[in-house]
């Protein structure tokens, strides 16, 4: 069993799919591990650290690998360097990218999307969305504090009092909860909103105030899997009116709302942006999915009427060392379920609910029901 840790080819991706610690674990499972030269440099991991953990360092490490671990989906020009039949595990970003999935199927690869891991108890330690969103929520507050021209906590000095900043978090998933906790630790006055009723108690437990139109639709606004449902136009209008009044008084707004398989919902209009005070900051964590904020631009900071709208890409990657460590552990925990410990080889149980939920391509075809061509489905 040969495992390859590929180098990321996207210039904006500093993360890596393994650390020296996870390499050691793979070795104890009986695997040979090869790491692409320089794969960990952007995450602060030297080739020598991988070698000390027992890995080989090379260039075309994927050509002979039975299992390839990556952060992002392989680019089309990478596929020729993969062995047909190899298992490729990464964050595949499959929604809207069916053509790329077909290319992987045509290359004979078994593609596994870590972000489709079901949210069940045994898969919690494999949940890459949570591990990376947690860091993104923390980094959002750090970035906001950097862009904001004032201190966050209240400071009483002989020269006068600096008031505490008011921070509003929109979307209380993993990223939102971490943003709330971080902002509170930094001394800000925090409010938050979400369409899922279960989040109210979570928000208040962190010392923040919850803001929402709490009607009957709100009480039933969560799927069995714990995700937010798309709300009716009527509810959206009522919630938008409440939020619009609240935003006028905020110094920093952090938006985190995403709906799986859909564009990010629009939460902040240009009129809301115009109502904010000059010097205010908006951090849009959903900008890669179209953004929650009208006027946000992916990879850029826009100044609109004195308000900064920040649209950093790959926010978790802005903490590359921490993000890589958590992601590598997610991969290790998942891969461990695919290995026969006695035979020391891959032994995939195709009926395992984790496998069925995450495998996109197999035997030259797209097999995941959400992404199969309509005729095949």
Image (cartoon, rainbow, N blue to C red):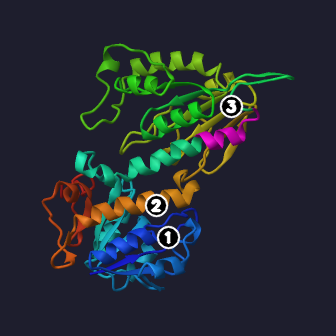
Q: x and y percent of residue 296 in the render? A: 61, 40
The vertical placement of 349 against 39, above or below, is above
Q: Secondary structure at mark 3?
A: loop
Dominant secondary structure, magenta: helix
Q: Is residue 252 magenta?
A: no
Could you tell me which quadrant the N terminus lies in? bottom left
User: In the image shown, does 310 or 76 lie closer to the viewer?
Assistant: 310
User: In the image shown, does 279 or 153 lie closer to the viewer?
Assistant: 153
| Residue picked out by circle 3 | 152
- Mark 3 neighbour density, 10 Å: few (under 14) some (14–19) many (20 or more): many
Q: Secondary structure at mark 2?
A: helix
| Residue picked out by circle 2 | 325
Q: Quadrant of residue 225?
A: top left
- Looking at marks 1 and 2 on the same chain, the residue that comes earlier in the sequence is marked by 1
| Residue picked out by circle 1 | 8
Q: x and y percent of residue 281 in the render? A: 67, 34
Q: x and y percent of residue 104 in the render? A: 33, 70
- Looking at marks 1 and 3 on the same chain, the residue that comes earlier in the sequence is marked by 1
Could you tell me which quadrant the C terminus lies in? bottom left
The vertical placement of 52 against 241, above or below, is below
């Amino acid at each position: 069993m040969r495992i390859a840790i590929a180098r990321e080819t996207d210039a904006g991706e500093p993360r890596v799919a393994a650390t020296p610690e996870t390499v050691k674990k793979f070795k104890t499972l009986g695997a040979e591990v090869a790491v692409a030269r320089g794969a960990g440099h952007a995450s602060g991991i030297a080739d020598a650290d991988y070698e000390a953990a027992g890995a080989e360092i090379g260039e075309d490490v994927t050509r002979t690998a039975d299992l390839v671990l990556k952060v992002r989906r392989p680019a089309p020009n990478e596929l020729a360097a993969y062995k047909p039949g190899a298992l490729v595990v990464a964050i595949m970003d499959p929604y809207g990218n069916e053509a790329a999935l077909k290319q992987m199927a045509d290359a004979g690869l078994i593609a596994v999307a870590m972000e489709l891991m079901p949210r069940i108890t045994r898969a919690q330690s494999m949940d890459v969305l949570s591990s990376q969103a947690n860091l993104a929520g923390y980094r959002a507050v750090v970035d906001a504090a950097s862009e904001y021209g004032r201190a966050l906590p209240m400071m009483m000095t002989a020269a006068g009092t600096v008031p505490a900043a008011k921070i509003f978090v929109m979307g209380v998933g993993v990223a939102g909860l971490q943003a709330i906790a971080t902002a509170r630790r930094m001394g800000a006055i925090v409010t938050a909103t979400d369409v899922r009723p279960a989040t109210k108690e979570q928000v208040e437990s962190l010392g923040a105030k919850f803001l929402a139109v709490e009607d009957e639709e709100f009480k039933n606004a969560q799927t069995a899997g714990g995700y937010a449902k798309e709300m009716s136009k009527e509810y959206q209008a009522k919630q938008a009116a409440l939020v619009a009044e609240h935003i006028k008084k905020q110094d920093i707004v952090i938006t985190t709302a995403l709906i799986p398989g859909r564009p990010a919902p629009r939460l902040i209009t240009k009129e809301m942006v115009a109502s904010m005070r000059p010097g205010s900051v908006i951090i849009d964590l959903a900008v890669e999915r179209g953004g929650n904020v009208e006027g946000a631009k992916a990879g850029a900071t826009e100044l609109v009427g004195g308000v900064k709208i920040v649209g950093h890409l790959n926010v978790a990657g802005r903490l590359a060392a921490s993000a890589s460590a958590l992601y590598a552990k997610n991969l290790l925990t998942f891969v461990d379920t695919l290995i026969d410990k006695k035979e020391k080889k891959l032994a995939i149980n195709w009926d395992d609910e984790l496998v069925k939920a995450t495998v996109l391509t197999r035997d030259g075809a797209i097999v995941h029901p959400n992404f199969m061509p309509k005729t095949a489905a």
